[in-house]
Amino acid sequence: MIGDHQTINGNTQIDDNEIIGNHAHICDNACIGDNVVIGDNANISNNACIGDNVKIGDNANICDNVCIGDNVTIGKKARLYNNPCLGDNVRIGTGADLRDNVCIGDNAIIERDAKICGNVCIGDNSSIGENAVITENVCIGDAQCGCNCD
């Protein structure tokens, strides 16, 4: 199902069973997997690769060269800047901000309004709390809570 007034640019691959919200924008060379939901006013930039069973919230901004695994949920107004890579079964909260070249491991949880600074890796099965600011790598299975928890 495709909503009203959306833009889907050239060389974009969209599989079956997608739901694309009103005023969503998908740029060139994006690859969208099966059963993907893209919310209203969401932006998917150039060369994004989105796996199967992904849900992208309203007003989310997915920038260039983003790679998103399967079974991922990205909250409303979340921002994924250039070149991040998200593993499978990841949850990104509302308003979360992932800067350039961030790597998020499988089964990780990034809560609402958390900020992950550029060139940082978050290990598999890790949890980052609400409003946290992460500036260094987080080990597998580690939990970081609150602000400035590097």
Image (tube, grey):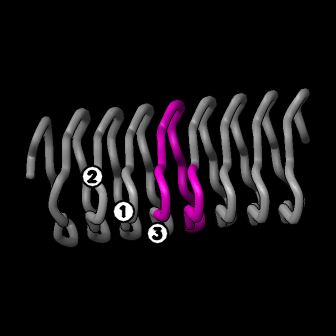
Q: Is residue 69 left or right of residue 34?
A: left
Say above or below: 104 vs 94.
Answer: below
Q: Are marks 2 and 1 in contact (CB under 8 Å)?
A: yes
Q: Is residue 24 left or right of residue 2?
A: left
Q: Secondary structure at mark 2?
A: loop
Place residue 61 in its image quadrant. top right
**Magenta stretch containing residue 70, yes or no?**
yes
Q: CA distance from mark 2 to mark 1?
A: 7 Å
Q: Residues within 10 Å of mark 2 (few under 14, many from 20)?
A: some
The residue shown at (46%, 69%) is: 87
Residue 66, image x, y percentages: 56, 62
The residue shown at (20%, 40%) is: 132
Three-letter amino acid code of the residue under disc 3: Gly
Label placed on residue 117: 2
Q: Residues within 10 Å of mark 1 (few under 14, many from 20)?
A: many
Say above or below: 17 vs 103.
Answer: above
Q: CA distance from mark 3 to mark 2?
A: 17 Å
Label placed on residue 87: 3
Quarter of the image for the N terminus: give it.
top right
Q: Main secondary structure of the magenta part?
A: loop
The residue shown at (53%, 32%) is: 76
Q: Which residues are magenta?
A: 63-83
Identify the residue position indicated by label 1 in the image: 102
| Mark sitting earlier along the chain (3/2) | 3
